[in-house]
Image (cartoon, grey):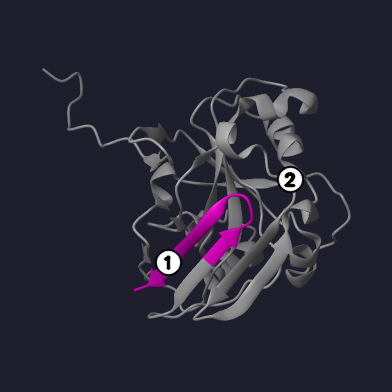
């Protein structure tokens, strides 16, 4: 007999290259404006100010290869990100040991209802309405760090219908992966199953139904997603 009063939902999980076993997702942290050029295009200052984070929901991660255009929005943007998956956590993790907590990496898109996010910013309200909607994080399979290492540089790119939109390099991140993990752990108790979306390069722009997005991160993988 179940201990729950309703049927428990299946826990969100990601596929892992090289195995049939899956990676369970506990929380999703997203860093904002972590590439200088994107910070500028969004009206910010690229100086190395303390990072800021927002969250998506674990079940926003979606591996179907399709992105359903969301309701209540007419301006939805792509944001190419590298996903960092943690195998362990803790508090006040030192930068020098932060990568010891990483299980692997994946290509991910932080899809954003930009019009609703903009309205929330103007009203000084939280961003979740623009960020944490259903299937708002199309994701590729995880590649274990034991297989690919810890990518610190490498080309990142995204095309829409074959036309280049976003280009950059992992080494352009203002806050590197070990620093993000360390900083987050000062404010949250990180744990196995947490994932971090590590920011997007410049070139974010709107998509329409029928578009095909192709994203790649050198050393990590690629992802193709159709807007439906």
Distance between the Cα atoms at labels 1 and 2? 25 Å
Q: Position of residue 54 (x, y in %)?
A: 60, 47
What's the magenta region?
215-228
Image point 48% across, 43% down: which residue? 142
Image point 89% across, 55% down: which residue? 47
- The image quadrant where one finds the N terminus is top left
Residue where numbered disc 1 is placed: 225
Q: Secondary structure at mark 1?
A: strand
Marked residue nearer the N-terminal end (1 or 2): 2
Q: Is residue 222 magenta?
A: yes
Q: Quadrant of residue 46?
A: bottom right
Label 2 crowding class (10 Å Cα cut-off): few <14, some 14-19, many 20+? few
Residue where numbered disc 2 is placed: 152
Is residue 64 positioned above or below 213 on the image?
A: above
Q: Is residue 131 magenta?
A: no
Image point 17% across, 27% down: which residue? 5
Q: Relative to 123, is 109 on the left or the right?
A: left
Q: Quadrant of residue 191?
A: top right
């Amino acid at each position: 007999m179940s201990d729950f009063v309703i049927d428990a939902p299946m826990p969100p999980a990601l596929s892992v290259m090289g195995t049939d076993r899956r990676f369970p997702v506990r929380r999703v942290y997203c860093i904002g404006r972590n590439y200088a050029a994107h910070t500028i295009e969004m009206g910010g200052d690229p100086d190395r100010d303390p990072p800021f984070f927002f969250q998506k929901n674990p079940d926003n991660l979606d591996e179907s290869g399709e992105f359903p255009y969301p309701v209540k929005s007419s301006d939805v943007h792509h944001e190419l990100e590298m996903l960092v998956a943690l195998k362990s956590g803790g508090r006040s993790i030192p930068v020098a040991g932060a990568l010891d907590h990483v299980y692997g990496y994946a290509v991910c898109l932080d899809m954003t209802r930009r019009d609703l996010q903009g309205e929330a910013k103007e009203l000084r309200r939280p961003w979740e309405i623009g960020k944490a909607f259903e299937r708002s994080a199309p994701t590729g399979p995880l590649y274990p760090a034991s297989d690919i290492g810890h990518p610190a540089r490498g080309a990142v790119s995204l095309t829409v219908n074959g036309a280049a939109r976003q280009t950059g390099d992992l080494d352009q991140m203002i806050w590197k992966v070990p620093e993000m993990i360390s900083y987050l752990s000062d404010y949250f108790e990180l744990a196995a199953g947490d994932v971090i979306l590590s920011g997007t390069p410049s070139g974010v722009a709107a998509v329409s139904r029928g578009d095909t997005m192709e994203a790649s991160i050198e050393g990590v993988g690629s992802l193709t997603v159709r807007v439906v």
